[in-house]
Amino acid sequence: MIEEKSLEVEKTVLVGIINSRQDVVQSKEYLDELAFLAYTAGGVVMHRFTQKIDLPNPKTFIGSGKMQEVFKFVDENDISSVIFDDELTPAQQGNIEKILKVKVLDRIGLILDIFAQRAQTSYARTQVELAQYQYLLPRLKGLWTHLERQRGGIGMRGPGETEIETDRRIVRDKISLLKKKLIVIDKQMSTQRGNRGALVRVALVGYTNVGKSTLMNVAAKSNVFAENKLFATLDTTVRKVVIGNLPFLMSDTVGFIRKLPTQLVESFKSTLDEVQEADLLLHIVDISHPNFEDHINSVNQILKEIKSLDKPTLMVFNKIDIYEPEPWDEAELVEQRGEKHFSLEEWKQTWMFRMNGQALFISALNKDNLDGFRQRVYDEVREIHVTRFPYNHFLYPEGLEE
Ligand SMILES: Nc1nc2c(ncn2[C@@H]2O[C@H](COP(=O)(O)OP(=O)(O)O)[C@@H](O)[C@H]2O)c(=O)[nH]1
Ligand SMILES: [Mg+2]
């Protein structure tokens, strides 16, 4: 249940850095995304601070001059939390809090807060709670005790109604308890997966907010929560889908995001089993997003981490209804023609070529090219199916007859 009352708007400011790994353009894009995350968590961004800094300050991440600027703004504008785009060490977080005298979060803390608000099943809640406590434990020393008044809100919410516990000893006990609980649920889940029989399994993967749940709803006539927010869905949903008589299972689960630390992916490993055990992946891409290629790379990176990059994969480019090729820029035309600024037709050629004809272009919302989508998925699933059950290949003709 997403409680409206817990979504009180909190005034926040964002802090990002510019260095050799993230230039001005990229840093802006990361902060755009961070603002979207803050909005999803129920915050409103009042200001963004950036600093050009090659090596972050080991004590305070940003330099002291910039910190004073942030402090002044926070103090004068009744800001309740400051969110850093990059991962802070527990020590940095503590130091910054002492200086700014408000709650300090990083991207991971913010994402965990969103997860906590959005996990629905007891399984997802347990996973989130464990991840939250593991993230918190090293940060507990003196954490926010000087901020008694401002406790609660973004970064302090647990997956239940209650605020998360901040006593070290209790937290340690909780962690071991949650781990035990997960082992039990994991066993149940894997038995459940085993009971699904030999049906071909298709998993939707992709960056967050690309339209996975929307596509799941169209394809499986299901009713998965879809919303223009990051991490709207966290729980895994599995549905039986039938295309042209051919039944298979489709799963929709949490999306991926950049700068997601391996440790967090680790906590969701069991959720990602759905992906690992799938026979076919549908990698959904939001083609209307200016940085979709970056998104593709981040998703592939995580797939690689969970050893699923070499699975049969169909690239599905979604939201073609709002795709706008960027206007041609003559300088870029010469320089970047190989990478960017293609018309949809040209993209199709490129991806068709690169993906060995494995790319699809659809609009899940407008239901554009869904026949083409069904046809391709049918072909792929059929191929896997008849390899598994060679004796009933005659049941499923090559090509879909509508
Ligand atoms: N314009 C457009 N919007 C879409 C399309 N597919 C999904 N969306 C919207 O994108 C947002 C995120 O969709 P959702 O299915 O929740 O994404 P998920 O995070 O990948 O599961 C929602 O507001 C959807 O309505 C599409 O084909 N075109
Ligand atoms: Mg979703």
Image (tube, rainbow, N blue to C red):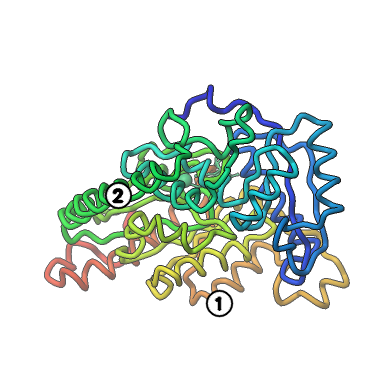
Q: Name above or below for residue 9 compared with residue 272.
A: above
Q: Is residue 328 visible?
A: yes
Q: Residue at x 81, y 44 (%)?
A: 70
Nearer to us in this view, 160 or 364: 160
x and y percent of residue 237 in the render?
A: 34, 46
Which residue lies under the disc numbered 2? 241
How many numbered marks, from 0 up?
2
* Residue at the image point whose x is 85% and y is 66% from the top: 329
Residue flagged by tag 2: what amino acid is it? Answer: Val
Q: Secondary structure at mark 2?
A: strand
Q: Is residue 42 left or right of residue 252?
A: right
Badge 1 local density, few (<14 within 10 Å), some, or many (20+)?
few
Q: In screen coordinates, is 378 left or right of 341?
A: left
Apparent side of residue 69 relative to residue 241 in the rendered image (left or right) = right
- Ligand 1 contact, mark 2 (Cβ < 8 Å): no
Which is nearer the eye, 105 or 239? 105
Residue at image location 63% in from the left, 35% down from the top: 146
Quadrant hosting residue 120: top left
- The quadrant of the rendering that contains the N terminus is top left
- The mark found on residue 353 in the picture is 1
Instruction: Please state which amino acid type lies under the numbered disc 1.
Output: Phe
Disc 2: CA contacts within 10 A as few (<14), some (14-19) or many (>=20): some
* In this picture, residue 230 sits left or right of residue 47: left
Residue ranking furthest to the left: 391
Residue at the top extreme, as displayed: 5
Residue 290 rendering spot, x and y as whole percentages: 69, 57
